Image (spheres, helix red, strand yellow):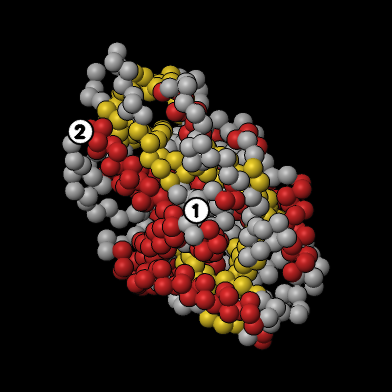
Amino acid sequence: MSDPLDLLIIGGGASGASVAYEAVCRGLRVALLEGADIGAGTSCRSTKLLHGGVRYLELAFKTADPAQFRLVREALLERGHWLEQVPFLAHRLELALPTTNVVGQGYYRIGLGLYDALAGRTGIGASRWLSKAQLEQALPLLKPGLNGGVAYSDGQFDDARLNLLLALSAEQAGAQLHTGCRVTKLEKTPEGRICGAISLTADGREQRWSARVVVNATGMQSDAIRRMADPDLAERMLTSRGVHLVLKANLCPEGVGLLLPATDDGRVLFMLPFFGRTLVGTTDTACDIATASAPSAEEQEYLLAYVRRWFPQLSDLSVGSCWAGGRPLLRPSGDDRNSSRVVREHEVETLPSGLVSVMGGKWTTCRPMAIDTLEAVAAQLERPLPPRQALPLLGSATVPGQTSALLSQQRQELEALLPNTALRTAQANHLHSNFGLRAPALVGGWSESDRQPLSEVIPICRGELHHAIHSEHARSATDVLARRCRLAMVDQSEAERLVPLVNELLEDQGYAAGGQSLNLAH
């Protein structure tokens, strides 16, 4: 029998992939088990913002809650980290808060000035006044009667690709990565200590895993894994559904997004540039896990009603795609607060049996979540972990601060490899944004026909579809078209057109596509 792993991680979302990545950086023997696809749950369904959380800062003032201040400060520092580490996946985004009077402008300007200050040296641009003319230029279809506003900066990113690159980078450094591998039982020693798990593969094979420490990083499913360790545990997770629409219209032609800080029922809404279209979201509706990924007709109409209210001149409300994701909110013990009031902090819990669970948190802070988790792992191993070794994410430079310059330097090389079509510039942008510095080497290995763009919405090509299946663990049309590229999340009907081709490629690689269609709920 082989030696047990140092660490077995259950869950391949942002937190699980981050734990795997940080663990291999410290020399641990790691396996990551994901029951579906990497990032298939909440982690591919965010609002695509790397942000401190303007809403949480305002809540901190209103409730005098220091936990909210800590969360905003930590998240702003992490925003700066990711913008430097993966500039091909993340970029600065300016957002406008419209106002109707000078008092409103002053209120937001003071609050956003503090938001800027909390970022410290990782700041990405100071907030600024917007005159009425500047607001109209940035958002030309916005309703009349506004008195300018305030603009501030946050980060926008590709959540599914970052999740995937964390997992693939860990795998390249030695971690075992298994998708379609659902944990059905935790194993214990005669003394009651967790010592591994039993999993079931998609084809029904049972596998046994032996590990010194098991980490539960399953987000909304955390309570299910915790109860495998102890059936009598109280539930800690509170699920809230966030629904997003992608309008075919581009309401943000200058690349400036819109933040509506107070809807009639006290929610915050974003309208953001998204692949030449407009991402609208998000709702905040308490739900059970079973319905977390199912957008309701009422929630869709709720979002469209605000689009109509703020963009009354817009005549085309065509929706390209609609999807939902559940927020894995951590309920403080004995607390039943409404989901909109729950602090997005995380907690690392270690049960008497030794199971380590990382719960709560938000995408932007997945790295500190992973570091805190590894502190708990070290306690279970009863030894300090080795020093962290540098491990650039796939597509990044060895020295992270050099990535942007190197991307610019290789731009001409990449474009020279692409077909001379009207989409060449867009295709180069897309390939760089997906693969970073690896793009020219990958494209150079594809045939000329495999480089031809297949869609005007996102100029993906056959070569990258094949790469997703062969090298990125994609096993279904949804894996390829919704997460390896974002076509299905932008225009579902356009993605459906390519499903037969993806199924053909899956079958060529020996995977049973079996007429798979898209399913954005999985």
Disc 2, SS:
loop
Identify the residue at image location x=47%, y=57%.
65
Alpha carbon distance from label 1 to label 2? 34 Å
Residue 420 visible here: no
Label 2: few (<14), some or many (≥20) within 10 Å?
A: few
Position of 113 compared to 121: left or right? Answer: right
Quadrant in the rendering for residue 143: bottom right
Q: Which residue is mark 1?
A: 159
| Residue in the foreground of this view, choosing between 21 and 474 | 21
Q: Residue 137: percent from the left, percent from the top?
A: 65, 82
Q: Which residue is mark 2?
A: 382
Disc 1, SS:
helix
Which image quarter is the N terminus in? top left
| Residue in the foreground of this view, choosing between 321 and 337 | 337
Identify the residue at image location x=69%, y=61%.
263
Marks 1 and 2 close (CB-CB < 8 Å): no
| Residue in the foreground of this view, choosing between 53 and 477 | 53
Instruction: Single out the residue that lies furthest toward the top.
Output: 190
Which image quarter is the C terminus in? top right
Q: Residue 24: percent from the left, percent from the top?
A: 27, 43
Q: Residue 213: percent from the left, percent from the top?
A: 30, 30
Q: Amino acid at mark 1?
A: Asp
Identify the residue at image location x=58%, y=33%.
513
Q: Amino acid at mark 2?
A: Glu
